[in-house]
Image: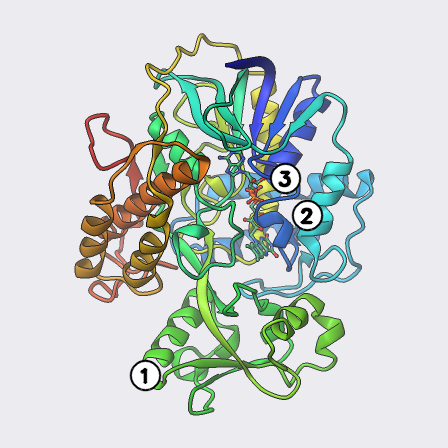
Amino acid sequence: MEESSTDILVIGSGAAGSYAAMHAASLGARVSLVTKTKLLSGSTRWAQGGVAFPSDPNDIPSHLMDTIKAGRGLVDEHVSQTILNDALEQLNHLMEMGVHFDALPALEGGHSKPRVLHINGDESGLHLLTFLHSQLPAKVSSLENHFASQLISDGKAVGGAVFWKDGDPTRPVTIRARATIIATGGIGQVYSFTTNPEESTGDGIALAYRSGATVRDIELVQFHPTVLSNGGLISEACRGEGAVLLNKRGERFMKKYDPAGELAPRDVVSRSIYRETLDTGGVFLDLRPIRDLEHSFPTVYSSIVSLGLDPISEPVPIQPAAHFLMGGISTDEYGATSLANLYVAGEAASTGFHGANRLASNSLLEGLVMGSRAAGKAASSIPVAAGDCERYDTPGCAASYQTPIRELMSRYASVARDEDGLSTGFSEISTIPFAQACTSTEAETANLRLISLMILKGALERRESRGSHYRSDYPETNREAAHIQQQIKLEDSVTG
Ligand SMILES: Cc1cc2nc3c(=O)[nH]c(=O)nc-3n(C[C@H](O)[C@H](O)[C@H](O)COP(=O)(O)OP(=O)(O)OC[C@H]3O[C@@H](n4cnc5c(N)ncnc54)[C@H](O)[C@@H]3O)c2cc1C
């Protein structure tokens, strides 16, 4: 086995991981930044809208109120206040480094004023990430095509991770580290329809869970309402500019569900589209009210045209798709987990900032702030003797199970859920066999299986409707807002 050591190991090179790596290096640490594909990977690369920054210090209370309102009782007010307090410092830092944000902030769903900063129109994520990678200092050594298969952990502390070069378990690489930061992004690939890229298989969450870390509120998955059949997202900003939703009969319907119409919160719009699709056979977005669509929303326009559709002359078919995970590995306000020297930043974390429903463009903000904080804590962490894992076993399932997992999750655990469906999904996915993984695709499939079981279990336990989680058999919101935590029981045979 190839072995190396570093001060700080960062797994994942999206916004959270890259920013964390940069900060840790600026504090004098040697950093390894490792990704299973290319450096330019993950959801960050696809983010269109931008980053939500308070417009000035006086705007922090209002940004906080919007965040709390969207999160439906589950936002941690203290953590959110501290994230927003740090936001402007990070904005200044990015601008000093040379990031050029577009001049005018945009208004997005749920925000009471324009505060979303774009970088080069609707290609914000791509430009942000390319810029961060161009600034990585020499103290950061980056490794591409290294798949994290297991954390080095005795169940109490973490001392690095094992990777498979080119996804091949016969070429293992051990990287020992004083502190490890997981920044592996979300879980969208557990669903048939998702805006997330193929890397979003929940690997970091699965690895941390198997090592004993606490996972929280993983049943809280946000579905983006307006997604094309190729996974291309039609940004909320299009509805902000006048695009309207029509059912199969050509009727506008949103006002029937919410007085805000097309600009209602994401969960309301997704459920309304789901309902109208069942009732009338389909839903379409009419973008013709937007002037000069081709130039104002170039990514949206080209995504539609690539499907052979013409948004200038006809409404385009859309559906809700899995978009963002509010839950994840439970952390404190510095990204620390229940395991010593394991930190998490970005979408893989549950910090309490997003509650039960993320406010638009708050995720990149969280990734940047928490990336820098986790780096600060990791750089000053005291080395502990993390015992080795007892065995280097990585579970794997045959890749052919990916489609059935996605279909079951889309049928039973998407926009509308109920006890019968969730129980059926859980028992069917539990029966999928797993053994020692022979490829990284098999390991990813086992991760999809594990994440699906955790989502189903959490959704069964959450007997209420709250934010993005809608139970048709429990349509009311409980008076008490509660978190749902999950931690491995080592004897549990269905975890994989
Ligand atoms: C289409 C789209 C549009 C969006 N628009 C916005 C927006 O406008 N504003 C906003 O705030 N948010 C937006 N979001 C959400 C936001 O982009 C993500 O929440 C955020 O980018 C997540 O960043 P991250 O660094 O946590 O993870 P990611 O950017 O997803 O990066 C994850 C990294 O981990 C690596 N990785 C994963 N598993 C492994 C493994 N086993 N071993 C090694 N490496 C691994 C991946 O290769 C990748 O490098 C959007 C998301 C999508 C999909």
Q: Position of residue 31 (x, y in %)?
A: 65, 21
Q: Amino acid at mark 3?
A: Lys
Q: Amino acid at mark 1?
A: Asp
- Residue farthest toward the top in the current orientation of the protein: 385
Whether the residue under disc 3 has CB within 8 Å of ligand 1: yes
Nearer to the camera, 424 or 107: 424
Kindly report which numbered mark, 1 or 2, lies closer to the viewer in this rendering.
Answer: 1
Mark 3 element type:
loop
Sequence-first tag of 1 and 3: 3
Kindly report which numbered mark, 3 or 2, lies closer to the viewer in this rendering.
Answer: 3
Whether the residue under disc 2 has CB within 8 Å of ligand 1: no
Residue 34 visible in this rendered orientation of the protein: yes
Mark 1 element type:
helix
Nearer to the camera, 97 or 443: 443
Question: Mark 3 sits on what residue?
Answer: 38
Q: Position of residue 324 (x, y in %)?
A: 48, 53
Nearer to the camera, 149 or 157: 149
Sequence-first tag of 3 and 2: 3
Q: Position of residue 68 (x, y in %)?
A: 47, 53
Q: Is residue 114 above or below residue 283?
A: above
Q: Is residue 119 above or below residue 282?
A: above
Sequence-first tag of 1 and 2: 2
Res 279 label: 1
Using a 10 Å C-alpha cutoff, classify the residue at mark 3 as few (fewer than 14 neighbours), some (14 to 19) or many (20 or more). some
* Image point (59%, 67%), residue name: 235
Q: Amino acid at mark 2?
A: Pro
- The C terminus lies in quadrant: top left
Q: Is residue 303 left or right of residue 421?
A: right
Question: Mark 2 sits on what residue?
Answer: 57
Question: Distance of mark 1 from mark 3, alpha carbons?
Answer: 43 Å
Question: Distance of mark 3 from mark 2, alpha carbons?
Answer: 37 Å
